[in-house]
Image (tube, rainbow, N blue to C red):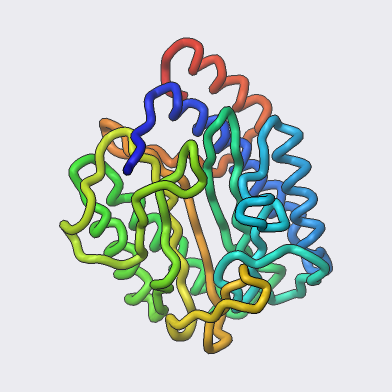
Amino acid sequence: MIYKKSREELGAMRRGGIILADTLNVLEEALRPGVTTGELDALAEGWITGHGGIPSFKGYRGFPASICSSPNDVIVHGIPGPLVLEEGDIVSLDVGVLYEGFHVDSAWTFPVGTVEDRALQLLKVTEASLEAAIAQCHPGKRLGDVGHAVEAVAISGGFSIVREYVGHGVGRHLHEDPQIPNYGSPGRRERLTQGMTLAIEPMVNAGGSATKALADGWTVVTADGSLSAHFEHTVAITEAGHEVLTARAPAAASSRLQRLAGAAQAGTHG
């Protein structure tokens, strides 16, 4: 069942999205050669809880950390720990926040210092595939249009799409219907309607599309050892089109939370 959100529920997700976006900004500022993924996890947990949120991932089906950190050939679900990030690495930082009873979900893949041109191109194309998917998000479009947009951009850039892992609905539960593959045929599958909230998350590999799950039960890597990138936003379908609830902005979280709280009380959208 697809759960559509009311204006008040979207307001909660919007405020949670601010906390999440600022968490990614804080992580990006801390990201440098020599930092461990465990240090980034502690930083994210402190920021989220310090702003009234709860890390969505910690304890979810037994996951032991507050964020997923997935470097280089790790596609998704990497577990933070003692791994030291090095110059030239890339790393996906996936963050979920529970705030006022609603989850939001977003991920970004960052370069660590200076990276090779192929890695930089992978990041650019994967981010562009997310932007193309979001551009399809307005009432009347279908999920096949969203997935097709991701696949078209990734393939035209010379990369491959991960097919085993997909995006999803998000809201009162971290994972809700519908599933959102990063491939598809235009005009097919569920129709997008106002109130749907979707976690759209392209996962794109520099090599082949095959994946392999590691023995820890969480970490998923490329089967051929090639680099992988992962970008994700939580997007609401609105009457006029869409709203990216996890959009990153430079302003301080506290001031933006106050502004949005005031807008919610006035019954308007921030």
Q: In this view, does 110 lie to the left or right of 38?
A: left
Q: Can residue 4 be seen in this view?
A: yes
Question: Where is 65 relative to 253, above or below?
Answer: below
Q: Position of residue 127 (x, y in %)?
A: 46, 61
Is residue 125 left or right of 249 when viewed as pictured?
A: left
Residue 157: x, y in percent? Answer: 38, 76
The picture places residue 42, in percent across and down from the top left corner, at 79, 51
Quarter of the rendering containing residue 158? bottom left
Q: Which residue is drawn at 49% across and 17% down?
A: 264
| Residue plotted at (60% across, 56% down) | 94
Q: Which of 156 and 239 is in front in this view?
A: 239
Above or below for 247 versus 101? below
Report the side of 148 relative to 235 (left or right): left
Above or below for 146 versus 23: below
Going 57% across and 77% down the picture, which residue do you hit?
213
Choose between 155 and 62: the one closer to the eye.
62
Count the marks: 0
State the residue lying farthest toward the bottom: 224
Extreme residue in the left direction: 187
Snapshot quadrant of residue 98: top right
Going 41% across and 79% down the picture, which residue do you hit?
159
Quarter placement of the N terminus: top left
Q: In this view, does 19 lie to the left or right of 196?
A: right
Q: Which residue lies furthest to the top in this view?
A: 266
Q: Does residue 90 appear in the picture of this structure?
A: no
Q: Which of 65 and 141 is in front in this view?
A: 65
Q: Position of residue 16 (x, y in %)?
A: 57, 34
